[in-house]
Image (tube, helix red, strand yellow):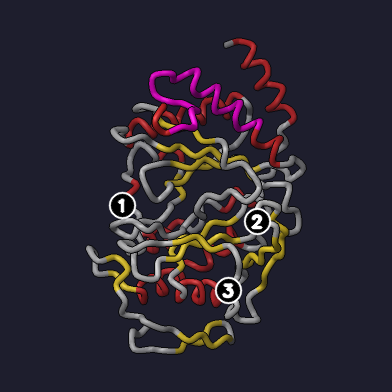
Amino acid sequence: MPKEVSNVEVNGHVIPLSHLDKVFWPQEGLKKVDLIHYYSEAASYLIPHLQERPLVWTRYPDGINSKGFYQKNAPAHLPDWIDTFTYYSQESDRDIHFILVSGTADLVWLANQAALEMHPWLSRAAAPDYPDFVVIDLDPSPGNTYKQVVQVAWTVKQVLDELKLHSYIKTSGAEGLHIYIPVQNQYDYKQIRDFAQSVAAAVCHLLPELATIERKVNKRGSLIYVDYLQNARGQTLCAPYSVRPRSGAPVSCPLHWEEIDLIEPSQFTIKTILPRLHQYGDIFAPVLNDRQSLAEAQERLGILAGMV
């Protein structure tokens, strides 16, 4: 995409682009135009993971070294061709109009708004109270190594394998790892969160010297936080292939389980991930269709809990 372009046509929509030469990643010299180009090129892989899901997006108008902010409510200048989902927030006592991404033009428009991160809900607009995934977020404490995070990840998989559940893993785009367990969307958020808490507790029982479900940061010490609390309506994890506002312009990258011992999360960036996508496609696609029942897993989890 030429840097001198001020307007671009995407899927029949003309999008005015501004400040294309603004530097977003100073250390790497990456600019706003690089962000727009990345989301344009990655759109076909990313959009299925955003489609029909209320979106929270993080904006960094002056680059990653300046203050960013989350945005939930669609701005007044949102183009009329971008769909929204209206949801009443009891917390703020108002309607919030969430953006629903459905095409490449939507992503290009968002990138032009300096939206670096894409955070979709775990549930879709058609069934906002019934998530499609259980998620486990492995969040290292200062001093933890990536090797230790991997050790906890394998233990999560061990527990899930015992429960006969398929699981899928991706880098967080930072130092952590995200594990998804796709489920039939017949369970509400409380049921999903309670299940995730039981899994997290089982992992911590197996790795007491390395993992914790302690919420308070100052009480975790050097333990890795096995976060199950993201399983709540309105809580989000960054989408697969979402950019992160960190040095190097890293991307949250889906992995094959056998890869997690072999990689460094920082190797996946907006400059390096596209060849991988072109070679392997979207290896995270099964999370969208591999709908699993938790009935047998909950029974097995109860048996496991009685054994520890």
Along the horizontal axis of the image, is 305 left or right of 36?
Answer: right
3 or 1: mark nearer the eye: 3
Whether label 3 touches label 2, CB < 8 Å? no
Residue 198 position, x and y percent, is 61, 26
Residue 292 position, x and y percent, is 69, 39
Of 239 and 226, nearer the camera is: 226
Residue 101 position, x and y percent, is 60, 68
**For the point 33% across and 43% down, which residue is it?**
263
| Outermost residue, left side | 27
Crowd rating for badge 3 (residues with CA inside 10 Å; few <14, some 14–19, many 20+) = few
Please provide the residue range marked out in magenta.
194-216
Q: Quadrant of residue 274?
A: bottom left
Residue that badge 1 annotates: 267
The answer to whether 211 is drawn above or below residue 113 in the figure is above
Along the horizontal axis of the image, is 59 left or right of 53?
Answer: left
The answer to whether 267 is drawn above or below residue 51 in the figure is above
Mark closest to the chain's N terminus, 1 or 2: 2
Mark seen at residue 75: 3
Whether label 3 touches label 1, CB < 8 Å? no
**For the point 72% across and 59% down, which residue is it?**
88
Name the amino acid type tagged 1.
Gln
Name the amino acid type tagged 3.
Pro
Name the amino acid type tagged 2.
Ser
Whether label 1 touches label 2, CB < 8 Å? no
1 or 2: mark nearer the eye: 2
Residue that badge 2 annotates: 92
3 or 2: mark nearer the eye: 2
Position of the C terminus by quadrant: top right
Q: Is residue 261 magenta?
A: no
Mark closest to the chain's N terminus, 3 or 1: 3
| Outermost residue, top side | 307
Secondary structure beneath label 2 = loop
